[in-house]
Image (spheres, rainbow, N blue to C red):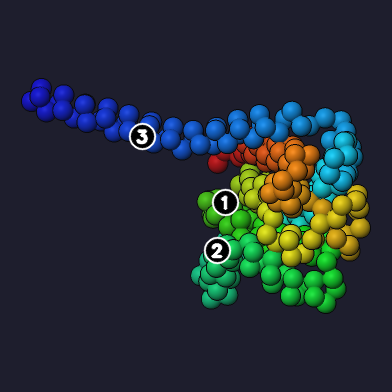
Amino acid sequence: MKGKIKYRIGKSGGFQLLTVILACSCVLPLIAILVYIIRAGITKINWSFLTNVEKPVGELGGGVIHALVGSMLIIFFASIIAIPIGILCGIFLSENKKSRLAYWCGLSVDILQGVPSIVIGIVAYIWMVKPFGYSAFSGSAALAVMMLPIIIRSTEETLKMLPDSLREAAFALGMPFHRVILKVIVPCGISGILSGVMLSVARIAGETAPLLFTAFGYQYLSTNMTKPMETLPHLIFKYAVTPYKDWQDLAWGASCILLLFVLILNILTKLITRKWKVQL
């Protein structure tokens, strides 16, 4: 009997050790990537790097301000497009679980989530760039399409976890349906909804393929959404493969900024969701 107990204890300890090893094997590549990019890029970042636009090869003082501003604007307008549509669609799917329309909408969301980003870029090119020309707005539209599945699914799954007693209590007080959703259901699920929104922003922050076909890139600082615009991912893609040391430095510095932006965004997501989490 004691031998069996020792065997089970040893077996349990072995599986726990295996779990720890596998967990560390997942974390170690991430740490290696973070350390390598930060070490290679942090030394390239200075005031000139953050305030100047790119310059010709051999000329000192080039920067990424035009790409940084372009990325922020394109992500901002993509969020304006995707967040309201995604949240409303998620609410519809969570409140109409058994309807045929909800089934087909959910299936479409799952398929859209699996579409490669370069395909979305090609479709945006055909629908928006060919008729109207390259523009930052077409890049925002392409990125908004990529944000939708994440926002929709996070909103839907969050609202599905809320107990039906919340709805019943609100209806019992005589509240109309739209007020029940806006004043009771959505505030209770704001933690999961915000998590999905921030996750979708982090997802598109480093996308390059759709922007190659839409925003295209521009070497000067511009805030005109109807014209081509540079972004950090496109600048990294453009300069990382060049043989010139100055441009490679720009790519490493831009990579570090992009990595830190995504890292900070994920940390903020954890802090916001923890602060606004509702205990049911």
User: Which mark lies nearer to you, 1 or 2?
Assistant: 2
Q: Quadrant of residue 225?
A: bottom right
**Amino acid at the residue labelled 3:** Thr
Q: Is residue 192 above or below residue 152?
A: above
Q: In x, y percent, where is residue 86? A: 67, 60
Residue assigned mark 1 = 158
Image quarter where the N terminus lies is: top left
Residue assigned mark 3 = 19
Labels 2 and 3: the sequence-earlier one: 3
The reply to whether callout 2 and callout 3 are in contact (CB within 8 Å) is no
Q: Secondary structure at mark 2?
A: loop
Crowding near the residue tagged with mark 1, few <14, some 14–19, many ≥20 C-alpha atoms within 10 Å: many
The residue under the point 59% across, 63% down is: 116
- Calculate the distance from the C-alpha at mark 1 to the C-alpha at mark 2: 21 Å
Q: Secondary structure at mark 1?
A: helix
Q: Quadrant of residue 265?
A: top right
- Calculate the distance from the C-alpha at mark 3 to the C-alpha at mark 1: 28 Å
Q: Is residue 209 above or below residue 257?
A: below
Q: In x, y percent, where is residue 68? A: 81, 44
The residue under the point 63% across, 62% down is: 117
Image quarter where the C terminus lies is: top right
The residue under the point 58% across, 75% down is: 101
Q: In x, y percent, where is residue 274? A: 62, 35
Residue assigned mark 2 = 114
The reply to whether callout 1 and callout 2 are in contact (CB within 8 Å) is no
Q: Secondary structure at mark 3?
A: helix
Q: Using the rendered image of the protein, determine whether residue 90 is visible from the camera's viewpoint.
A: no
- Calculate the distance from the C-alpha at mark 2 to the C-alpha at mark 3: 29 Å
Crowding near the residue tagged with mark 3, few <14, some 14–19, many ≥20 C-alpha atoms within 10 Å: few
Q: Quadrant of residue 81?
A: bottom right
Labels 1 and 2: the sequence-earlier one: 2
User: Which mark lies nearer to you, 3 or 1?
Assistant: 3
